[in-house]
Amino acid sequence: MPAARTRRGTPAGLRPAARAAARRAVRLALAAALLAGCASTEAAPEGAPSPTPGDGRLVVAYAAAGTAEERAARTFLRERRVLEDAAAYAGARIALPRDVPLRAARCAAPNPFWDEDTGRITYCYGFVPDARRVFTGIDTDGGAAGRAAVDEDVVGLSNGVLFHELGHALVDLYDLPVTGREEDAVDQLAVLLLASGDERHADYAISTINAWGALWQASEGGDPGIAAYSDVHSLDGQRFFDWACWLYGSDPGRFADAVDAEGNPDGVLPRDRAALCPAEYERIDSSWRALLGPHLRER
């Protein structure tokens, strides 16, 4: 996982009270589905053939694991059906022009990636222990409940990064236009997919937000350096606030506890940014909806 960057004292993520409140709010109302319904998609002109989605889906496979840590990661992924469930969730919403392998494998570096040359998304076994170490620092309860929470957060972050990599695949496979950073654009798609789902997938978005916050805080401040500033990804702290903003913007009532407001000291999102988040989310929603319209399973 990328090196963390932060200032001392910055909140690492949605604090337990805010996270619990957000999860309780999820139970009260589900966000309107962005990609599952898309009822507002503009109809084709009369007499014009309607574009039909492709038949492609994400096809899961597991490569051999070498070390004991890799074998444990492979077992965890298979027993929890992490890749299978992510593939099914995305496949119910977005059609691909052809089947795309989603392969768990040994990697030189632990981060999952999309490879345009091979046309494959790879989930690296090393990502599981790396993610577990990040969340162990957040969920400090060392008992069975704490370990279960860490496991669920690893699943959540895995979904967040897999949908991010799916975004890269969609940009390449459909030659989609991107006017800003592609990394930011596919982060936005990942949030849209998670925020438009059920309680479990909203929790996955919260897990991903908490991971960016923890990575940001872990560096203990200081200049992140030229490599970080010149990287194609936004800084960890920026991704933390962007993801928090977009999730909040998807349903401000549902995620009100994310905002640092009077009487809510556990909020992490500054009020000035929070005021802009609903409009940000609507813009992201309409942009990706326009790009993916012909490729949605349901319209």
Image: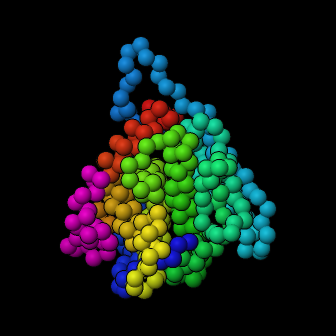
Decide if residue 37 is in sight here.
no
Q: Give coordinates of residue 285: x percent, y percent.
A: 36, 46
- Identify the image quadrant of the C terminus: top left
Is residue 145 or residue 267 the one in the foreground? 267
Does 271 appear in magenta? yes
The magenta segment: 259-280
Q: Give coordinates of residue 47: x percent, y percent.
A: 41, 13
Decide if residue 132 is in sight here.
yes
- Identify the image quadrant of the N terminus: bottom right
Judge whether 257 appears above or below 87 on screen. below
Is residue 280 or residue 91 the one in the foreground? 280
Residue 37 falls in which quadrant of the image? top left
Q: Main secondary structure of the magenta part?
A: loop
Query: Going 37% across and 32% down the picture, which residue do you hit?
Result: 41
Judge whether 231 appears above or below 170 on screen. below
- Count of marks overlaid on the render: 0
Left or right? Give the position of 225 relative to 76.
left
Query: Going 54% across and 67% down the picture, which residue do you hit?
Result: 153
Query: Going 47% across and 67% down the picture, which residue do you hit?
Result: 231
Q: Give coordinates of residue 272: x percent, y percent.
A: 21, 66
Judge whether 111 appears above or below 53 on screen. below
Q: Give coordinates of residue 117: x percent, y percent.
A: 65, 50
Left or right? Give the position of 263 relative to 286.
left
Residue 40 falls in which quadrant of the image? top left
Query: Going 32% across and 51% down the picture, which residue do you hit?
Result: 281
Does 57 appear in magenta? no
